[in-house]
Every structure is written in structure tokens, then in C-alpha cells.
Amino acid sequence: MAKSVTCLVITLAIFSVAASIDEKCGACNAVAEELERGLSKEKTRNHLDLRHRLDSKGQREGKLIDYRVSELRVVELLDGLCDKMQDYTLEKIDSTRQDWIRVDNWENLSISKQEAKAYANDISTYCGRLLEETEDELAKLIKKGSLRTGDVSKVLCEDLSKHCNKSSGSQRLEYYSNESYGEL
């Protein structure tokens, strides 16, 4: 029994290395798509009122901050983004192409649920590394209002992370499996 469990763990470890994010552009576009989904679902918010103290005349002191340029907005958009990537997996389109897709029902996949979850873990890990690399610049762009729906993929994947070049940016959420394997 222990021997078969060890064999399974080794097989999964080997599979996990082989299934790592081979083509960063497709994975980056999937992360950008999820961030764009967050931007589009954003509700209009009032300014943040930080005037909680009263001065000697009874007037409120403090700042009134526009929500669109606040750190709170950045945190709400980016916090939990990589957890949402657990809803994505690779789906084989044909013998040479696979797409990152958002999964609504894990029971209706063309690959095994275990394999799909392994891909989900891979892209979630990739997302964490991507945000670690680009978070400061991304936060500045969000605060300035420069990051808009429709531009997220270009900004995140071409300009900030450089995981896509201008010509590959049009190949949203897909990669070609005959490309060489690379590490994150």
C-alpha cells in the first residue's frame, strides 16, 4: 500500500513539472481576463470619508478620498484574484492547441477532474508569481485610472510582465503544446 502511494506521489510530481505553465502568455491572459471581470463587476462607490476626528470648533478633520484612486480599491481588485484562478483549467482544443477556460461545472470536463485541478493549482501559483512581479506597477495604474476594461490583457501581459509580445497578445487564452517547456 505504501509503495503504491509513493509511486502515485512520484507520478504526480513528474506530471506536475510537465504540466507547469508552458506558455506564459496564455496563462497571463487568463489572469487578465479574471481581473477584467473584477473591474467590470465593480460597483460605483462613494468617496472614503476618513474625517473621524473633531477639531476644537467641532468641525470634522481628516481626508475625503476618492474611491477610484484609493488603496482599498486596489486591495479589493487584487486580493483573492489568484484564488479565483482555481476555477480555471486547460482544455484541449485539438492535438496542437489548448485553451485556459473558466470552469463552471467540474463534472463536465473532457479531462479527468484530478488533472483539471492540477492545472488549476498551476495557474493559481502562476498568478501569485505574476502579481508578485507586477503588483506595484499594477496598483499605480489602477489608482491613476489607467487600467480600464478591455486594456487589462495588454497592460498586464505585454507592458508590465512582458509575457506576451504584441503579436501573441491576439491569441487570448491559448497556447501551442509543441513549444518548449519553461519554468515560471
Image (cartoon, grey):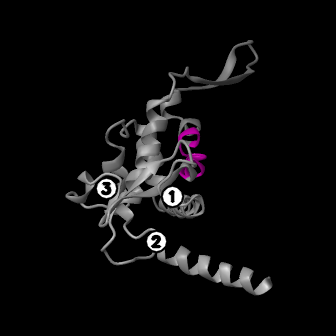
Q: CA distance from mark 3 to mark 1?
A: 16 Å
User: In the figure, is residue 122 to the left or right of 53?
Assistant: left
- Residue at 58%, 42% (x, y): give it: 75
Mark 1 surroundings within 10 Å by alpha-carbon count, few (fewer than 14), some (14 through 19), many (20 or more):
many
Name the quarter where the N terminus is drawn.
bottom right
Query: In the rendered structure, which segment of residues is drawn in magenta?
Result: 75-85
Near-viewer residue (119 or 53): 119
Where 48 sits versus 74, above or below?
A: above
Q: CA distance from mark 2 to mark 3?
A: 18 Å
On the image, the x and y values in percent for residue 137 come to: 43, 53
On the image, the x and y values in percent for residue 7 come to: 67, 84
Q: Secondary structure at mark 1?
A: helix
**Kind of residue at disc 3:** Asp
**Kind of residue at disc 1:** Cys
Residue ranking furthest to the right: 1
Residue on which the image places disc 3: 159
Q: Are marks 3 and 1 in contact (CB under 8 Å)?
A: no
Q: Are marks 1 and 2 in contact (CB under 8 Å)?
A: no
User: In the figure, is residue 90 to the left or right of 83?
Assistant: left
Mark 3 surroundings within 10 Å by alpha-carbon count, few (fewer than 14), some (14 through 19), many (20 or more):
some
Residue on which the image places disc 1: 127
Where 115 sits versus 147, above or below?
A: below
**Kind of residue at disc 2:** Leu
Q: CA distance from mark 1 to mark 2?
A: 10 Å
Near-viewer residue (9 or 159): 9
Label disc, if present, on residue 89 of the rendered structure: none
Please report whichever mark, 2 or 3, sits nearer to the chain's N-terminal start: 3
Q: Secondary structure at mark 3?
A: helix
Near-viewer residue (132 or 86): 86
On the image, the x and y values in percent for residue 184 come to: 46, 71
- Quadrant of the image occupied by residue 181: bottom left
| Prevailing secondary structure class for the magenta stretch in the rendered image | helix
